[in-house]
Amino acid sequence: FHTKARKASIMFIASWYSNFIFYGAIEDARECFASVYQAIELKKVMKNENIRLFDNL
């Protein structure tokens, strides 16, 4: 599991798809999809727990 994919899993939502498009070779798609899955799960937890980030920016 590449460090880039781990970092991408907690980055801004727009990076979900850009990581897949620009990530590289097809064998790295597995890490990319895992990253998207983690980001979606994080978003669900934040919504369910009423956690807000960047509201004051």
Image (spheres, rainbow, N blue to C red):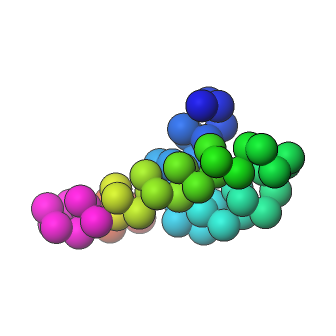
Q: Is residue 45 magenta?
A: yes
Question: How many numbered tags mark residues here?
Answer: 0
* Front residue of 21 and 12: 21
Q: Is residue 44 left or right of residue 38?
A: left
Q: Which quadrant is the N terminus positioned in? A: top right
Quick check: can you spot residue 48?
A: yes
Q: Is residue 21 left or right of residue 56?
A: right
Q: Which quadrant is the C terminus positioned in? A: bottom left
Query: Which residue corresponds to the image point at 77% horizontal and 44% vertical from the top-left?
Result: 27
Q: Look at the picture and state if 50 lies above or below 30.
A: below
Main secondary structure found in the magenta portion: helix
| Range drawn in magenta | 44-51
Furthest residue toward left = 49
Query: Which residue corresponds to the image point at 34% horizontal and 56% vertical from the top-left?
Result: 42
Q: Look at the picture and state if 26 lies above or below 48.
A: above
Q: Is residue 24 left or right of residue 41?
A: right
Query: Which residue corresponds to the image point at 59% horizontal and 55% vertical from the top-left?
Result: 33
Q: Is residue 9 magenta?
A: no
Task: Give x and y (percent) for residue 29.
Answer: 71, 51
Quarter where residue 56 is shown: bottom left
Task: Give x and y (percent) for residue 16.
Answer: 60, 62
* Front residue of 27 and 40: 27
Q: Look at the picture and state if 37 lies above or below 10.
A: below
* Front residue of 43 and 24: 24
Quarter where residue 28 is shown: top right
Task: Give x and y (percent) for residue 11.
Answer: 53, 52
Q: Is residue 35 left or right of residue 49?
A: right
Task: Give x and y (percent) for residue 41.
Answer: 34, 58
Query: Which residue corresponds to the image point at 14% horizontal and 62% vertical from the top-left?
Result: 49
Quick check: can you spot residue 56?
A: no
